[in-house]
Image (spheres, rainbow, N blue to C red):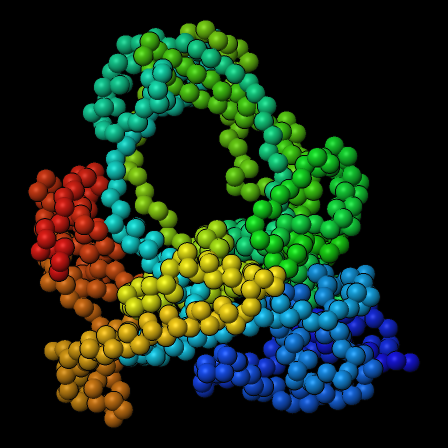
């Protein structure tokens, strides 16, 4: 009997696939990539048409030797790596490393690891798609050029083993720009007003919110203004000028893409992007289910498509009709559109067997696997269900001059909400008396005024950063998680309570990149490069054309930066802090978390201390000096040197100036000085002396 060899990427995937194929098939794993560019050098022959110099990855020699033995015994070889650019590139590297030119070697792909999908892929075996390979080669070479040419410039400037990356540098800039926007934000006061109204014969008050005048919506900007309005309202009579009941529908959500799965897993399960992808990978490759063996539970996890196969639609329809009824089926005319680039024509992320409910297999999954599978399963089933229907009642309450409004909403047909709800789907279960009618006179019971201040933009979370990267066209499904992990692991960004903050080290790197490598950190340019990689994939652009157009500008920028940065090379700053171990004056050094004090006698003396940079600004609470401190994860803030005796802290730099209105402390926010007390709200422009310091 002919011997067939199937090569996949991971051992767990091999185990799952092995049981679908007969005894004439051997399934082995390459454990991911087997060849890559060398770590010790650029690995790209600039003079020879930018040819990459691939070498066997250290530690993979023994594995390749075993694979070569299996290849010799086989009549046919099937390369079954993941169905995307990177998977195609791994198959190509295996083809070359195993010298399969004279063998019957084919490429097979499947979007889900099921018996039918695997067997169908063998029937439709094909040659390696070099357009996909070249798109991945272009990305790898571009990223290597940026990393290996720019990183030495950072070493000169910051004097540590820092690194730059093509996509990570843009992500860092996006976070830095948001941080700057937050720090420059000046709160603006506003007020809201609500009132309780009683209709004749009713006991329960009707609560409504101030809208404005009868003809126009109106903002309330001060307490004086709200008090004037209340005084007028106390003299007024009120009646219901309009009451309207209407129906609205809310369509079911689209099934998950990589981006939306990462976002929802972060919101609902508190998973990092990296954790989501790791668990999703295990669900895709296969989990041992009691009574069923090893099963791939979800389709391929790296996709930006919301397409669903006809077979999956049919299975979902049968499941929904049987368990919820035909009324809950999505209508034939409800077509979901996806107008963006669909990577590799993948399907959305969905369960491979819709009738395998989370409850049925809970005992076979880890807690995190169960929670993620349940999220994916519910979202997919909901996506194939009918829209939810609501009945909304809105009420307008008018005096002779002003208007209040209120509304209520109730679900009249749950549709997809039966299976899947998000925070946005939850409604206020307020209800109105059936006696309310247009023209009814109401009596005002109580007016409730509240002071508010506008809030700055929110700090990025991993979920919101992924959403922004996707919207801007930066990166692809496979790059979101590693990009975020990289900037966190290099301490350019700190993650605290889900939020991402730029660190002092991140600010230094970002400022250098913005100054010397403008195009690399330009959002539009990076998105344009992604578009070019897509054109390489569809065969309309040659990959080396992309590289040869990119290199000259990058090389010129590096040469200019090296000259400029050499002129402002930072020497170790000597401080007046004496090393208690050897008596030398300690110097300022940069580490993974930013600045620290170190003895210049290293390596004989290894003494180090935290670096507290003095600001010369008196503490508003105890009059000691304000110093710059850092959280455990490297986020910078301003605190009192007498901590913990004095607990003053601020994320913004305090000013030496006192507020002329309340005498309190002032903070620097962009080009403004703002009173720390929001209720005071005093704002002034910085003097040129302060601004230029």
> Which quadrant of the figure has residue 34?
bottom right
Q: Could you say where residue 291 lies in the image, as x and y percent from the top left?
A: 81, 63
Rendered position, 443 above or below 382: above
Give me the residue at 22% from left, 60% from top. 638
Rendered position, 408 above or below 363: above
- For this orientation, the residue located farthest to the right is 1
Give me the residue at 48% from left, 51% from top. 471
Q: Quadrant of the C terminus?
A: bottom left
Q: Quadrant of the N terminus?
A: bottom right
Quick check: 424 left or right of 357? left
Q: How many marks?
A: 0
Give me the residue at 52% from left, 52% from top. 263
Which of 430/421 is in front? 421
Q: Could you say where residue 236 lies in the image, as x and y percent from the top left?
A: 31, 9
Rendered position, 134 above or below 203: below
- For this orientation, the residue located farthest to the bottom is 604
Q: Could you say where residue 438 lies in the image, as x and y percent from the top left?
A: 48, 9
Q: Could you say where residue 573 lies in the image, as x and y percent from the top left?
A: 17, 78
Specify whether residue 202 is in view: no
Quick check: 648 left or right of 393? left
Specify whether residue 491 is in view: yes
Which of 141/622 is in front? 141
Give me the residue at 16% from left, 48% from top. 673
């Amino acid at each position: 009997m002919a011997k067939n060899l199937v090569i996949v990427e991971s051992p767990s995937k091999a185990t799952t696939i092995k049981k679908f194929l007969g005894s004439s098939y051997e399934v082995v794993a390459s454990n991911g990539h087997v060849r890559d560019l060398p770590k010790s050098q650029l690995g790209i022959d600039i003079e020879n048409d930018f040819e990459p110099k691939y070498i066997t990855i250290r530690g993979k020699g023994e594995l390749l030797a075993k694979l070569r033995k299996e290849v010799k015994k086989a009549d046919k070889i099937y390369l079954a790596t993941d169905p995307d650019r990177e998977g195609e590139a791994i198959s190509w590297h295996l083809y070359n490393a195993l010298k399969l030119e004279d063998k019957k070697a084919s490429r097979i792909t499947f979007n889900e690891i099921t018996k039918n999908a695997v067997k169908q892929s063998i029937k439709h075996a094909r040659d390696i798609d070099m357009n996909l390979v070249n798109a991945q080669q272009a990305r790898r070479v571009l990223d290597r050029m940026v990393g290996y040419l720019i990183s030495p410039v950072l070493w000169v400037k910051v004097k540590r083993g820092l690194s730059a990356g093509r996509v990570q540098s843009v992500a860092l800039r996006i976070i830095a720009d948001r941080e700057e926007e937050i720090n420059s934000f000046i709160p603006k006061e506003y007020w809201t007003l609500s009132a309780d109204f009683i209709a004749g014969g009713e006991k329960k008050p009707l609560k409504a919110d101030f809208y404005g005048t009868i003809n126009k919506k109106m903002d309330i900007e001060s307490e004086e203004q709200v008090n004037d309005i209340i005084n007028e309202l106390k003299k007024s009579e009120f009646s219901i000028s309009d009451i309207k009941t209407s129906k609205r529908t809310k369509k079911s959500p689209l099934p998950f893409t990589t981006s939306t799965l990462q976002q929802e897993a972060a919101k609902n399960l508190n998973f990092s992007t990296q954790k989501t992808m790791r668990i999703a990978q295990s669900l895709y490759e296969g989990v041992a289910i009691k009574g069923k063996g090893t099963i791939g539970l979800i389709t391929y996890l790296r996709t930006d498509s919301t397409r669903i196969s006809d077979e999956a639609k049919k299975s979902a329809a049968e499941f929904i009709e049987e368990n919820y009824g035909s009324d809950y089926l999505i209508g034939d005319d409800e077509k979901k559109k996806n107008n963006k680039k669909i990577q590799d024509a993948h399907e959305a992320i969905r369960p491979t067997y819709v009738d395998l409910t989370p409850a049925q297999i809970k005992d076979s999954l880890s807690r995190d696997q169960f929670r993620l599978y349940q999220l994916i399963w519910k979202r997919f089933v909901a996506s194939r269900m009918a829209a939810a229907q609501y009945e909304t009642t809105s009420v307008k309450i008018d005096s002779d001059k002003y208007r209040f409004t209120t509304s209520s909403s109730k679900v009249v047909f749950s549709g997809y909400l039966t299976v899947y709800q998000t925070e946005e789907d939850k409604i206020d279960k307020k209800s109105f008396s059936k006696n309310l009618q247009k023209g009814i006179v109401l009596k005002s019971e109580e007016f409730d005024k509240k002071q508010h201040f506008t809030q700055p933009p929110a700090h990025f979370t991993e979920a919101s950063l992924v959403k922004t990267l996707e919207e801007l066209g930066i990166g692809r499904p496979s790059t979101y998680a590693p990009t975020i992990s990289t900037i966190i692991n290099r301490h350019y960004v700190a993650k605290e309570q889900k939020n991402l903050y730029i660190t002092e080290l991140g600010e230094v790197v970002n400022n250098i990149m913005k100054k010397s490598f403008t195009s690399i950190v330009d959002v539009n340019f990076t998105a344009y490069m992604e578009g070019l990689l897509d054109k390489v994939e569809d065969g309309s652009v040659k990959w080396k054309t992309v590289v040869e157009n990119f290199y000259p500008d990058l090389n010129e920028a590096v040469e200019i930066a090296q000259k400029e940065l050499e002129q402002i090379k930072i020497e170790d700053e000597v401080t007046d802090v004496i090393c208690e171990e050897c008596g030398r004056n300690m110097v300022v050094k940069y580490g993974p978390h930013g600045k620290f004090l170190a003895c210049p006698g290293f390596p004989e003396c290894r003494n180090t201390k935290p670096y507290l940079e003095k600001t010369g600004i008196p503490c508003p609470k105890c009059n000691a000096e304000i110093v710059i401190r850092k959280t455990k994860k490297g986020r910078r803030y301003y605190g009192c040197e007498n901590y913990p005796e004095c607990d003053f802290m601020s994320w913004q730099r305090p000013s030496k100036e006192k507020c002329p209105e309340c005498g309190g402390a002032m903070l620097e926010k962009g080009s403004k000085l703002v009173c720390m007390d929001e209720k005071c709200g005093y704002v002034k422009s910085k003097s040129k002396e302060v601004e230029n310091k």
